[in-house]
Amino acid sequence: MSDDTLRKLDSELGALISRMSANQRRQLAKEITRDLRRSQIKRIQQQKNPDGSAYTKRKASFVTVQREIQFMWRGQKRT
């Protein structure tokens, strides 16, 4: 959107909000907050960044790396 369009939208929304009662503004803020929280939870569960790209994989911890190492003795796996 262009700056001019955003300014028009901002002024229209500001006028609309100024006509609302305190209880209506509180209810609107509660609904916006709830919807935003739900969308963030959904995005995090899908492992996506805000721009839609996937999360980068985490580096394997030392314990995980050690667990995958196997001991070999004369060509046989030892536990």
Image (cartoon, rainbow, N blue to C red):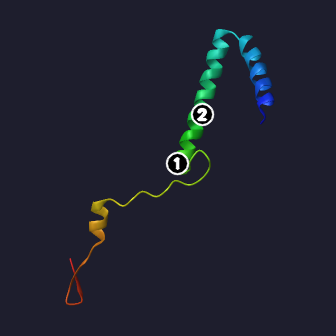
Dot 1 amino acid type: Gln
Percent position (x, y) of residue 12? 79, 20
Q: Which residue is mark 1?
A: 45
- Identify which residue, 57 or 23, lies in the foreground: 57
Residue at 63% of width from left, 27% of height from top?
32
Is 19 left, or right, of 64 in this rendering? right
Q: Quadrant of residue 65?
A: bottom left
Q: Is residue 39 above or below residue 19?
A: below
Residue 79: horizontal and vertical position, in percent? 20, 76
Q: Residue furthest front?
A: 3
Tell me whether the residue at label 1 lies in contact with that at label 2, contact meaning CB atoms closer than 8 angstroms: no
Query: From what the image shows, is residue 1 above or below residue 64?
Result: above
Identity of the residue drawn at 63% across and 19% down? 27
The part of the image, by quadrant, that contains residue 74 is bottom left
Quick one: quadrant of the N terminus? top right
User: Element at badge 2?
Assistant: helix
Q: CA distance from mark 1 to mark 2?
A: 14 Å
Q: Residues within 10 Å of mark 1 (few under 14, many from 20)?
A: few
Horizontally, is 15 left or right of 49 in the view? right
Earlier residue among tags 1 and 2 = 2
Q: Residues within 10 Å of mark 2 (few under 14, many from 20)?
A: few
Q: Most extreme residue toward the bottom, as rendered?
A: 74
Q: Position of residue 41 (x, y in %)?
A: 53, 41
Q: Secondary structure at mark 1?
A: helix
Q: Using the image, determine if residue 56 lies above or below residue 32.
A: below
| 71 sits to left or right of 29 | left
Residue at image position (24%, 89%) is: 75
Q: Which residue is mark 2?
A: 36
- Direction from residue 72 to residue 13 in the image, left or right: right
Residue at 56%, 50% in the rendered image: 48
Image mark for residue 55: none
Which amino acid, mark 2?
Leu
